Amino acid sequence: MIKFGKGNLRIPKWERPVYIVAGGLTDFRKKYPEKNSCQLVTEALRMAVEENQLKVDPEQIRRMVNWCVYSQFADHFGDQLLAAAKVHDYLGFDPLGNIEVKTGGATGGSSVLAAAQAIASGYASLVPVVGWERMDEVSTKVGNSYIASAACKDFESELGWMYAAYYALMAKRYQYENNVPHESLAKIAVKNHLYAHYSPFSQNPGKYTIDDILKNEVVSDPLTFLECCVMSVGAAVLFLADEETAHQLTDQPILLKAICGGSHTLRTADRRNMPILLLPNETEATYHHFLEGRRHEWPGFSSFLAARMAAYLAYHMAGIQDPVKDFDILETHDAFTISDIQTYEDIGLRPYGRGREFIDSGEAYYEGKLPTNLSGGLIGTMHAVGATGIFQIVELLWQLQGKYDQFHGDPKMWTRYGKTKPADWKSLQVKKARRACAISHAGTGSHVTCAILEKP
Amino acid sequence: MEWPTARLEVLNEEPLVVKNPKTWYHIHSYGGWGRFFKGLRQKIIMATRCTNPTCGEKRLWLPPRSECPDCWHPMEWFEAPQVGTIFTHSVVTYPGELFKLPPGTPLISVEIEGVCTKLMSWLKEGQPLFGMKVKAVFNTEKPTNTILDLAWVPA
């Protein structure tokens, strides 16, 4: 679709407020043979009900649940179709109704959206959103091939069998159009590996220099290994509730002001030109020079219309005027350094073509204007695909509740996962954080959700 | 009854890890897009165009689509030009399993005049550059019967 009708841009609304009350995670590993998927989701669920200072005991919480949403990207990986039925059974939620959501890398975000719809409509009052992925049953090479099955198998997958290659094609074009030095991309990798260093949940922490990133082995030119997300095993759980239930469960409920979705063609190459859909902080003048001068096409290969669409709807739904000003913390789907820069533009942190300024200016760092991916993101901490979008919101929930230190700084959290808390650990708790945003993203931008959380 | 003879190989005892082999194949139909793949055997690139007079999109679609996503009208087949320009490119050093091209092959996206989409493909000769003119070549000797039977070389 390249022309919008009025109905296409209708701003969604909740019939009643939606709250997030608790979150839980496992740690994330490349291989996790010690625990099967049912054990991993149970571990994350137990953390949600036992370690979030809830006012109701776990057994009572079980009796309050009335609908469940499951989030797993690929049956290929787990080699278990209808895995949700098995997980639902092992979590002891039978015979409650449930659905399993699948929208590629954005499965986690879409699952939270589905749960929010259930709460907002009145269909349910307490919904666990349970996500996981088991990516260690096959070799990395086969895993990449499975992931590339989420490109168009008739016209695209054969050309690489590797998602990094599809992002590399975008990266090359983006750099050609916008003259972005590789150093700017590398800064994102340095930042997210570093933030992962402070997280006991992280799979690929590291203190790297820009030079380390640039000199790292290339996966698909120009992207190096350290610029790409990890392939993980692990789980994440969130509980969403209506207002009454939220207050029954916790003294610190967080509002889910909005979560909206957008989409675009599975094949990047099928994206036709169209006028830029403007966000509240942009006007025609924002792009006057840009469109006339250098750029004849949008979204082209460099922009994610799906992310722009999701942000457009969510910003209007939550009354966001200027994302950098209005948000205190952000989690993006940093599958690759390039996609992070692209997303900065799609969600209006900078106008199109100037995304690098967000990282170059220092705004994206802890104690910057809008700290981004303090969790360590997908590059540093995890990408157990079905869990990813949920993991992002769990981390934001804890930030808004002021619980970063509880879950990241307690030495027992580190020993729980067989790790030692680093001597140079530091708190990434954002002080007085009130509003947060999470972007969940699939394919080369086939599905994107934008979630906005707010401390009441 | 006898116990089964097929067994799963044990890779690790604690935790118990077994190897579960998969050896079957999928029988995949290209359906309404088969004409494109058959066209490659005859050294032609078949694309589709919406012929609904009220539809705003008059350009060719490549990869082809059987129905127009703008108006849901059936599309018709037309031959696409065999020259284009390189829109973007990358060399994949670590491809996934099933990759059939030689290591170091440049992947390219080709812009073709009169086509509303771009086409992902590969460069069979030379080094890719932005805006480089390329022409199509076809694997008709031993076709793979995949999109790889179409490639491009400098024009």
Image (cartoon, coloured by chain):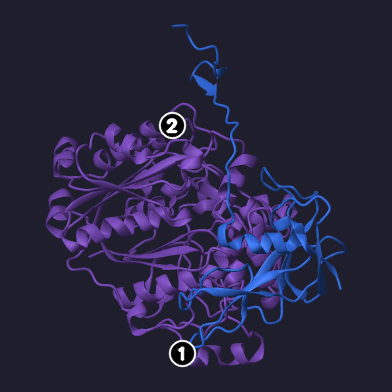
Q: What chain letter is assigned to the residue under label 2? A: A
Q: Is residue B108 left or right of residue A404?
A: right
Type of the residue with mark 1: Thr
Coordinates of residue A171 in the picture (x, y in percent): 66, 66
- Chain B is which colour? blue
From what the image shows, is residue A441 above or below residue A176?
Answer: above
Q: SS of the residue at dot 1?
A: loop
**Residue that numbered label 2 is attached to:** A415
Say left or right for B109 vs A46: right
Do badges 1 and 2 share one subunit? yes
Q: Quadrant of the C terminus of chain A?
A: bottom left
Q: Which residue is mark 1?
A: A283
Q: Residues within 10 Å of mark 1 (few under 14, many from 20)?
A: few
The three-letter amino acid code for the residue at tag 2 is Thr
Above or below, A278 relative to A244: below
Which chain's colour is purple?
A: A
Q: Residue at x 43, y 31 (%)?
A: A415
Q: Who is closer to the viewer here, B1 or A256?
A: B1
Q: Where is residue A434 drawn, in percent x and y?
A: 31, 66
Q: Nearer the viewer, residue A231 or B154?
A: B154
For label 2, the crowd category at 10 Å Cα-Cα, with few meaning under 14, some 14 to 19 and many 20 or more, is few
Q: Residue at x 33, y 64 (%)?
A: A432
Q: Nearer the viewer, residue A406 or A10?
A: A10
